[in-house]
Amino acid sequence: MKILISVALIIISFCITHRVGENAVRLLREKNINKEVSWFAYAFSFFILFLILEASDRYIDLHITFFKQVVGLVTCLMISYLSLLLILKKLNHKWYRRMVKELENHDKNI
């Protein structure tokens, strides 16, 4: 029974996190705030998911340790990727322009 509750919690929390991240990107884009800031908002929504999963795993004793670690890894990779983008932007590197085009195409799909 705990495994079913864990799976339900994982699916619900991931859906909520994804929607919150999309809404943050959309809201910040409408207010003409820097695009990198909206991308960081999406990444930090996954960080909040990681904190929620950490607390629920510790206090409710659900079997979600592996998923929690995966979310933590994805969050770290997203924040590292965006940090690399900002560094490349400061250096005005051609990789930055290519990565920004990919992220802008993703933003158009949201």
Image (cartoon, helix red, strand yellow):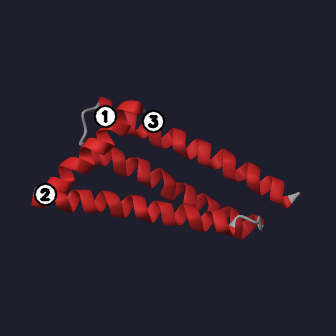
The answer to whether mark 3 and mark 2 are in CB contact below 8 A is no
Q: Which residue is mark 1?
A: 29
Quadrant of residue 82 within the rendered picture? bottom left
The quadrant the N terminus occupies is bottom right
Disc 1 crowd rating (10 Å Cα; few below 14, some 14-19, many 20+) is some
User: What residue lies at 25% left-to-right and 57% top-to-bottom?
Assistant: 85
Q: Which residue is mark 2?
A: 93
Judging from the image, what secondary structure is the residue with disc 1 in?
helix
- Tell me the distance, in whole angstroms, between the alpha carbons under discs 2 and 1: 24 Å
Residue 23 percent location from the top left of the image: 45, 35
Residue situated furthest right in the rendering: 1
Of 27 and 95, the residue lying toward us: 95
Q: Earlier in the sequence, mark 3 or mark 1?
A: 3
Q: Earlier in the sequence, mark 2 or mark 1?
A: 1
Amino acid marked by disc 2: His
Q: Which mark is residue 75?
A: none
Q: Which mark is residue 23?
A: 3
